Amino acid sequence: MLDPAHFVSTPAPGRACGACTLCCKVYDVPAVESVAGEWCRHARPGRGCGIHETRPGHCRAFHCLWMTEGWLGPEWKPDKAKMVLSLDPTTRFLHVQVDPSQPGMWRREPYYGQLKRWAVASLAQNRHVLVFVNRSATVVLPDRDEALGIFGPGDRLFSRERMTPNGVVIEVEKRTVV
């Protein structure tokens, strides 16, 4: 999973977290002993962070894609979409961290159709769209969604094209890298 401490991003003009705190629920934040899938003890859902001024660097450095990319519409703000979009700083894969209290939200429109379009567009750069509900990952491919199971810190996604009688198929595999 993405470690927000590995990169710093800047909000797009006019963007602010406001009352949105979904990142405080969907990510592990060891500095405050917060576990993915549970609200950080400092989060004030609907109101913001209770320790905003003194929050750890891990939290301070992170901005979701809705915050940094002004072209994403209001429907993608995490408190509305019930998912947090980010780019993995190493692979540049799109990570979609879904609120575990609404695990199927990513399959609803307008989200699912857009995730599929991003999956198609990402193939040319050998990138993928990965959806996480806690640590359980699914890769969104142009023709299907493939569950990968629990995706740990040492796990990596590998893909390859295979020619079939019906055309090219993308095969994916989760591997643990030691």
Image (cartoon, rainbow, N blue to C red):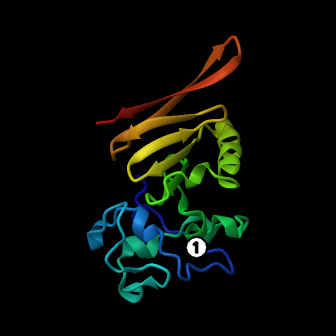
Q: Residue at x 71, y 15 (%)?
A: 166
* Relative to 67, residue 86 above or below: above
Q: Secondary structure at mark 1?
A: loop
Q: Residue furthest left?
A: 33
Which percent across, then down, holds residue 53?
40, 89
Q: Report whether 87 appears left or right of 114.
A: left
**Quadrant position of the C terminus in the picture:** top left
* Relative to 67, residue 140 above or below: above
Q: Residue furthest top?
A: 165
Q: Report whether 19 appears left or right of 174.
A: right
Residue that mark 1 sits on: 10
Front residue (pair 114, 92): 114
Quadrant position of residue 83: bottom right
Which percent across, then down, holds residue 129?
57, 45
Amino acid type of the residue that numbered disc 1 sits on in the rendered structure: Thr
Q: Residue at x 69, y 39 (%)?
A: 120
Q: Residue at x 47, y 63 (%)?
A: 7
What is the tally of numbered marks visible in this picture? 1
Front residue (pair 90, 110): 110
Front residue (pair 116, 99): 99
Quadrant position of residue 162: top right
Question: Mark 1 Cα within 10 Å, few/some/many (few <14, many 20+)?
Answer: some
Which percent across, then down, holds residue 4?
43, 63
Front residue (pair 13, 132): 132
* Relative to 88, residue 57 above or below: below
Which percent across, then down, holds residue 47?
48, 85
Quadrant position of residue 59: bottom left
Q: Residue at x 60, y 69 (%)?
A: 80
